[in-house]
Image (cartoon, rainbow, N blue to C red):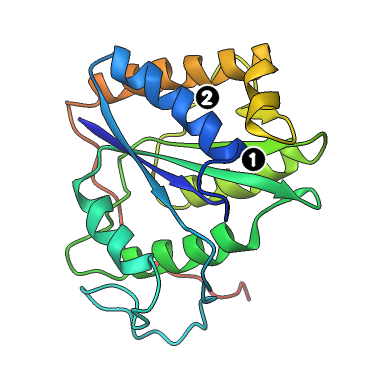
Amino acid sequence: MKVLMVNGSARAAGCTYTALTEVGKALKEEGVDYEIFGLGAGAMRDCIGCGKCSDRGCIFDDDAVNEFLQKAREADGFVFGSPVYYAHPSGRILSFLDRVFYAGSRSSAGSPFAGKPGAAVVSARRGGTTASLDVLNKYFTIASMPVVGSSYWNMVHGSKPEDVLEDKEGIQTMRNLGHNMAWMLKHLHEGFPSQEKGARTNFIR
């Protein structure tokens, strides 16, 4: 089993990465592999709603979206991590996830996310964490993904990685999240129930 994590920060080894690494350590203890997929500091396109997604993914192939979609099909679970900017996740990860989930939902092979557990992790200097978690969790709940929680909301605090490591409760929360994710993965072998498809209500008369 393998969990695919997204570092939605432009910093390759900053606070968000530090939090995800702690989740990964707990997964490893449970015999679950993981990979941290960094979005980097390059440009990230927004979804423009062109509707030209295909089995290859998004029509735009000049950033990390399609590479991630290929990896997502092989993954058993997901953790999306983001720094908090102005009480909100990074614009980088939101643009990325909008395109990833939209393109994934339009694949003839089916969604790469449905039935797979997901968790969000955020890092902040101080405030805006629960609002950011709320935004990220909505991607899971629209894609038939079980949401993994922990012993506190999935957040760490600090301005630099060394600060995060001093956030004892935050680090404990990351470890418990990893153990909870591993537990859920091990109990999902019975398979996910089939989903009704086709109904799409644009407005109510």
Q: Earlier in the sequence, mark 1 or mark 2?
A: 1
Q: Nearer the viewer, residue 201 or 167?
A: 167
In the rendering, which numbered label is found on residue 133? 1
Please identify the quadrant where the C terminus is shown. Answer: bottom right
Report x, y in % for residue 71.
24, 53
Where's residue 110, x and y in %? 22, 60
Q: Is residue 198 visible?
A: no
Q: Which mark is residue 144?
A: none
Q: Is residue 119 above or below residue 162?
A: below
The residue labelled by disc 2 is 149
Task: Characterize the local packing of mark 1: few (<14), some (14-19) or many (20 or more) Cα atoms within 10 angstroms.
Answer: many
Disc 1 residue type?
Leu
At x 34%, y 86%, the residue is 52
Q: Is residue 80 above or below residue 86?
A: above
Q: Is residue 36 above or below residue 93?
A: above
Q: Residue at x 30, y 41 (%)?
A: 115
Name the foreground residue: 33 vs 108. Answer: 33
For residue 158, side relative to residue 52 (left or right): right
Mark 2 residue element: loop
Residue 196 is situated, as x and y percent measured from the top left of the image, at 30, 54
